Amino acid sequence: MEWAPLFLSFKLAFVTTFILLIISIPLGYWLANSKSKWKPILETLVSMPLVLPPTVIGFYLLVAFSPSSAFGLFFSEVIGLKILFSFTGLILASVIYSLPFMVHPIQSGLSSLPSSLREASYVLGKSKWETIWYVLLPNIKASILTGLVLSFAHTIGEFGIVLMIGGNIPGETKLASIAIYDEVEALNYAQANFYALILVIICFSILLFVYLINGGYVKRFWK
Amino acid sequence: MIEINVIKALKAAEGNMILHLDVHIHTQSFAILFGESGAGKTSTLRMVAGLMQADEGSIVVNDEIWFDKNKKINLSPQERKIGYVFQDYALFPNMTVEKNLTFALKKNQDSKIIDHLLSLAGLERLKKESIHHLSGGQKQRLALARALVPQPKILLLDEPLSALDHQNRSKWQAYLKDIQEEQKLGILMVSHDVNEIFSLANKVIHLNKGQVKALGSPAEVLLQKENGFIPSLKGKLLAKKVEGDKVICTILILHKVFKTETSLLKAQALKVGDEVDFQLKD
């Protein structure tokens, strides 16, 4: 049994989720509070991965980072980052692809808080960041947890976009979802089933865990 | 002196409205903003707090400019150092009773004040509780205590006693008066309750559709028919005296005594000691 694709999938999901959390808190805060005329445009961009086929994003990333484009050349030669067919590229693609799954819960969580909480903290002399950190985020724990889990699970489930950007390099870009496709192509159903079953079990457990926590079942059980 | 001279276009239920204020209040006075809903009372508090920006004008407190449109000065709510009690209390749900207070401490501020305020608000035994376990009245007391932690010089209160029953309300009115005198606070409070105004305020600002309709002592503002306001006061009938076909009633409203006349027929139904509604048009 080959564990590498599973390991790689989870590594990608962890890294992506972590990066998304860092990006999505300021982005979600801005979207929840801004009255800027640019807001609808940014909201649309964030939500695009929900409606576009993953291959479309994959295709444009492929074109953008190809060594024949100036942008791609700049990245590989000047910055020295290899994006295409590398783990770095997978992270970039996953962050774009799973962005709405983290931003949306955080944005709607922040929007649902009464604005008086933020204002009360300001009036008490607390800065914007103190307010976000000590008042706002602790009150949207359920939304953050939902965002974390959805991003994680969605990254595990990626196929089209990672295949286009990463290809199928064992130990580097060959994720579990791609390995399943590979094994089926080779009529190796037992191995495909091994990957598939583990993904099913893990994703089921993660989602169940979230619903239990957010539904308050865990709290009631411990009482 | 708190000098508020501002113009702000507001969207009210009946359409757009211009809030135009030009009021000067002594820094240590207890001023009450009074008027129908949508008159601009909460907006006034929000502009003083820096939570809303006026379109024109200035707000100057003790010669310090908090807001000046022309000079492009607008201090942030953090810099204004005020206490604010919100209509919905705005307590932080993720914190305990005590944590709500300690969060409000300034940097390097002595935390002794927390115990003092907890006992003043009668919440010592609940200090480790989540705020979800508090009653409406307890939440209001906590919100007020929290606003007092950083020892502000000006306290803005948006209907802080509205959720309290009659008994608790009187207790809190006394408490507010005490802390105002004790801490030499300037208080600007929104209230609809005429009884409350008479017992607390030394200045009343009567707002009507965004305009200052009257400004002065409670009696000056509320007991003048020409101000177009007929208050209903709850009081206790102390004495009845028949004079011709009229009856002169002496009524105690909080700790002030008023006299009014009424018809024999109406007076018949009243006994000395009764709680009565007292209306000016009678």
Image (tube, helix red, strand yellow):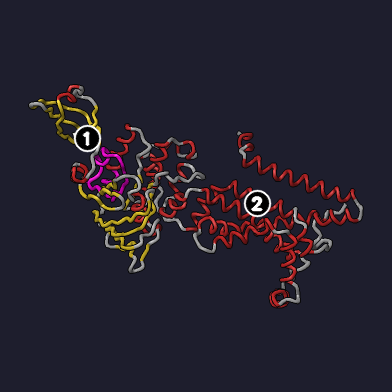
* Residue A94 inside the magenta-drawn segment: no
Determine whether, in the image, residue B98 is placed left or right of residue A75: left
**Residue that lies at the very extreme toward the right in this rendered image:** A187
Q: Residue at x 23, y 29 (%)?
A: B276
**Residue B212 visible in image:** yes
Quarter holding residue A53: bottom right
Q: Residue at x 36, y 57 (%)?
A: B9
Discs 1 and 2 carry the same chain letter: no
Q: In the rendered image of this protein, does residue A160 appear above or below residue B114? A: below
Which residue type carries mark 2?
Answer: Leu
Is the residue marked by circle 1 packed among few (<14), some (14-19), or many (20+) residues within 10 Å?
Answer: few
Indicate the chain on which mark 1 is placed: B
**Residue B107 visible in image:** no
Which residue type carries mark 1?
Answer: Gln
* Residue B192 inside the magenta-drawn segment: yes
Q: What range is drawn magenta here? A: B178-204
Is the residue marked by circle 2 packed among few (<14), some (14-19), or many (20+) residues within 10 Å?
Answer: many
Quadrant occupied by the C terminus of chain A = top right
Residue position for label 2? A148
Q: Secondary structure at mark 2?
A: helix
Image coordinates of residue B235 in percent, x first then y, are 23, 31
Q: Secondary structure at mark 1?
A: strand
Determine whether, in the image, residue B48 is placed left or right of residue B125: left
**Residue that lies at the very extreme toward the left in this rendered image:** B244
Residue position for label 1? B279
Give whichever of B209, A29 is nearer the camera.
B209
